[in-house]
Image: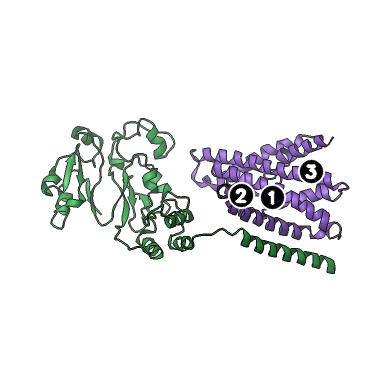
Chain colours: A green, B purple
């Protein structure tokens, strides 16, 4: 009875001591800041920074290979904490959100009936998608599926809608969209043009009820804050101030493709 | 003669008694790390290495410690102890001397310290070769061969599975079956296919 107890105890103690000793010998010096940066990051390992998880980003930030704002989901909170850890003066960052730049959906006509695999990635391989407008949303919701925060949903018109409260600007939907209609934009700017079609007016009118036709009404009304180029209006945020009549532009747009969130 | 037996052991653990698909050991890494081919390969390498090493070390423990004192019934406890601390030691060693190698499979080592497949190979070794060993050196050869080939079988199945799952990503799988559900069904079909090897007799 006593021998097995003795042998096992001795073995346990021996291995324990051996490991403790070995960890002394083989210890790898780690930057203590890495741990602290890691605790400031959200820890979701979402990969939005382009690194293999939060630990890899923390290491890169500590080394100086990545910027302090590399973590979009962490946003300002994480940035503040990391700046504290590294002792760096903090400068202002703007909160960003994903914005869907197409209002077509069911209002955009199809050019043929698509019956393949029901993902945007697959549909876009066949003649650049089944929509008559080659710039627009295909509506199978690859962005909805890929969102790790449940922040994108399809609305009744077949267009993905971003929930501003849930969106962390991780950029997964932007990567997933084969049409590149989602982009990261300044969240404080509410007004935008919900169309990316560069087609001529005749074509846009035929293809989609919600497309920008490049009529330049907004350009005149806003005194140059909206710029129409290549048959498409876009809002230059650097020219927007409080006196810009954005509300009127939203109302007067004939196809209602200027939106205000 | 010996070569003949080694060949039989190899074929047996790689195909007929494959650890994952016939003995149902190590299912956790099999499902968990088989989403992509590259991590699956590294995981397989780590498992092969640990299995071979643990075969070696458990042989030593069994022959020099458990057998002389007639405490074979403490097999489970002592095997887990030595395998766990040995793998820890190797992990530290790799981290210190080869950061590149540590990146490749060091992180997986901690995950499989006492994985049931690793422990399984040690137990199987002791059942098959060590209990009745009259020639320890011969038994060592068999143990290490079995450990290595079990790892090879593990890697093989992990690679099959990751290949299938990578393609499944692009398929139109019905919604309730997506992800884990279809992976389980694939695993069962593969298992049935591997059961076909059971007909081989040497």
Mark 3: few/some/many CA within 10 Å (<14, 14-19, 20+): some
Expressed as whole percent of the image width and height from the top left, the position of residue A74 reads: 39, 59
Q: Which of A156 and B13 is in front in this view?
A: B13
**CB under 8 Å between callouts 1 and 2?**
yes
What SS does tag 1 mark? helix
Mark 1: few/some/many CA within 10 Å (<14, 14-19, 20+): many
Tag nearer the camera, 3 or 2? 3
Label 1 lies in what chain?
B
Q: Is residue A211 above or below residue A56?
A: above
Mark 2: few/some/many CA within 10 Å (<14, 14-19, 20+): many
Residue B171 shows which numbered tag?
A: none
Q: Can the viewer see residue A141?
A: no
Q: Which of A2 and A186 is in front in this view?
A: A2
In the picture, measured across the screen, residue A7 lies left or right of residue A226, that is right
Report, in whole angstroms, how far the alpha carbon at label 3 lies from the one at label 2: 27 Å
Q: Name the residue under label 2.
A: B29
Sequence-wise, the earlier of marks 3 and 2 is: 2
What SS does tag 2 mark? helix
| Residue drawn where x is 17% and y is 51% of the image | A239
Q: Mark 3 points at which residue?
A: B141
Report, in whole angstroms, how far the alpha carbon at label 3 lies from the one at label 1: 20 Å
Residue B117 shows which numbered tag?
A: 1
Expressed as whole percent of the image width and height from the top left, the position of residue A155 reads: 33, 49
Label 3 lies in what chain?
B
In the picture, measured across the screen, residue B39 lies left or right of residue A172, that is right
Expressed as whole percent of the image width and height from the top left, the position of residue B65 reads: 82, 58
Sequence-wise, the earlier of marks 1 and 2 is: 2
């Amino acid at each position: 009875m006593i021998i097995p107890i003795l042998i096992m105890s001795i073995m346990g103690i021996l291995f324990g001591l051996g490991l403790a000793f070995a960890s002394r010998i083989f210890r790898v010096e780690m930057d203590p800041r890495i741990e602290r940066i890691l605790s400031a990051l959200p820890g979701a390992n979402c990969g939005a920074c382009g690194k293999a998880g939060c630990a890899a980003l923390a290491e890169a930030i500590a080394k100086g290979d990545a910027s302090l704002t590399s973590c979009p989901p962490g946003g300002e909170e994480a940035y503040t904490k990391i700046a504290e850890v590294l002792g760096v003066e903090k400068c202002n960052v703007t909160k960003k959100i994903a914005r869907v730049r197409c209002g077509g959906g069911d209002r955009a006509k199809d050019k043929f009936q698509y019956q393949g695999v029901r993902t945007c990635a697959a549909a876009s391989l066949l003649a650049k998608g089944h929509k008559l407008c080659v710039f627009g949303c295909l509506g199978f919701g690859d962005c909805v599926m890929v969102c790790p925060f449940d922040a994108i949903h399809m609305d009744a018109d077949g267009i993905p809608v971003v929930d501003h409260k849930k969106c962390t600007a991780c950029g997964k939907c932007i990567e997933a969209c084969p049409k590149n209609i989602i982009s990261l934009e300044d969240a404080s700017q509410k007004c935008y043009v919900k169309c990316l079609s560069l087609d001529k007016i005749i074509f846009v009118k035929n293809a989609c009820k919600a497309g920008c036709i490049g009529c330049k009404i907004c350009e005149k009304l806003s005194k140059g804050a909206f710029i129409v180029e290549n048959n498409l209006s876009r809002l230059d945020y650097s020219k927007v101030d409080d006196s810009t009549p954005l509300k009127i532009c939203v109302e007067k747009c004939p196809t209602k493709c200027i939106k205000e969130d | 003669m010996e070569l003949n037996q080694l060949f039989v052991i190899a074929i047996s653990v790689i195909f007929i008694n494959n650890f994952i698909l016939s003995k149902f050991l190590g299912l956790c890494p099999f499902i968990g790390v088989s989403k992509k081919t590259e991590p699956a390969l590294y995981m397989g390498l780590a498992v092969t290495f640990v299995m071979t090493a643990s075969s070696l070390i458990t042989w030593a423990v069994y022959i020099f410690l458990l057998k002389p004192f007639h405490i074979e019934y403490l097999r489970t406890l002592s095997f887990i102890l030595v395998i766990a601390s040995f793998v820890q030691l190797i992990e530290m060693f790799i981290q210190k001397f080869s950061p590149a190698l540590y990146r490749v499979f060091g992180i997986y080592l901690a995950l499989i310290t006492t994985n049931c497949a690793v422990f399984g190979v040690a137990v199987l070794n002791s059942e098959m070769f060590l209990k009745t060993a009259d020639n320890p050196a011969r038994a060592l050869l068999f143990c290490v061969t079995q450990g290595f080939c079990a790892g090879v079988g593990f890697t093989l199945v992990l690679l099959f599975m990751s290949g299938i799952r990578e393609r499944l990503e692009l398929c139109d799988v019905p919604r309730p079956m997506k992800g884990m559900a279809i992976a389980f069904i694939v695993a069962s079909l593969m298992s049935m296919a591997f059961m076909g090897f059971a007909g081989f007799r040497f």
